[in-house]
Image (tube, rainbow, N blue to C red):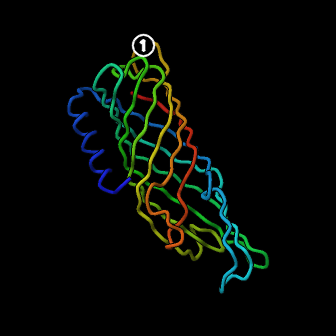
Amino acid sequence: MSRIQLPLFLLLGATLAAQAQEPRIGLGLNLSIPTGAFSRTVYPANGTVTTPQTETYDLGAGGQLTATFPVDQHLAFRAVLAAQYTGGNNTAPGYDRINLQHNLFSLGGEIQIFTESAFRHKGPYLFGGVSADFERFDRSFGDVNVDYTESSRKSRMGGTVGIGHSFGLGGSPRFTMEAAYHTSLTGTDTAAGDPPATSFVRVMFGWVF
């Protein structure tokens, strides 16, 4: 997916949102489980570190703010603002452990397909879309938030697909649960110095008003 597709997708979403009248605001708590190379990466020995390095990231936590714009009975566009934190460590035989921290801020747009009602945000739904992901990678031999820390930043496009369910009998708010998979779509050429794709399974618990 090229970089030009993200603004085109967001423009499509803005067009759909313009046709809607009552957006539904959502708040959620996200728990993320790293997968693939983001979960565990082994780097070979080099001129600086003479033994293999293993980087791992643990369970992450964060939150999201959403605005859902229904455009017909089964279709809606959703704008998503999300952030999360994930901690980890880098270990190598014969060397001190390095504490890692990954922070992700995302701004994206998604299409939602409801089986019952998009207008009422009710029932099961599928969703998928793209996002602009702004990442920061921190490394420290001590406390990342207190001691000397090396930081690097990366901006790249991400993609998300998932399934959700909005519970409730009458009006709002409605309790909502989602399970989704997110991964980096660009900037993943590790041979060129890019970090591995930030891939994780995300579970969300929240409310839609």
In the picture as drawn, the residue positioned furthest to the right comes out as: 94
State the image quarter where residue 74 is shown: top left
Of 54 and 90, which appears nearest the observer? 54
**Residue at the (58%, 44%) spot, across then down:** 201
Residue 73, given in percent of the width and then of the height, sits at 33, 19
In the picture as drawn, the residue positioned furthest to the top comes out as: 169
State the image quarter where residue 144 is shown: bottom right
Q: Which residue is mark 1?
A: 170
Residue 188, given in percent of the width and then of the height, sits at 49, 63
Of 98 and 129, which appears nearest the observer? 129
Left or right of 10? Residue 113 is right
Q: Is residue 22 above or below residue 54?
A: above
**Residue at the (49%, 73%) spot, across then down:** 192
Give the position of the C terminus as an image quadrant: top left
Residue 37, given in percent of the width and then of the height, sits at 61, 58
Specify the amino acid type for callout 1.
Gly
**Residue at the (65%, 61%) spot, across then down:** 88
Of 103 and 118, which appears nearest the observer? 118
State the image quarter where residue 118 is shown: top left
Residue 91, given in percent of the width and then of the height, sits at 72, 70
Q: Is residue 35 above or below residue 177?
A: below
Of 62 and 53, which appears nearest the observer? 53
Q: Is residue 188 above or below residue 62?
A: below
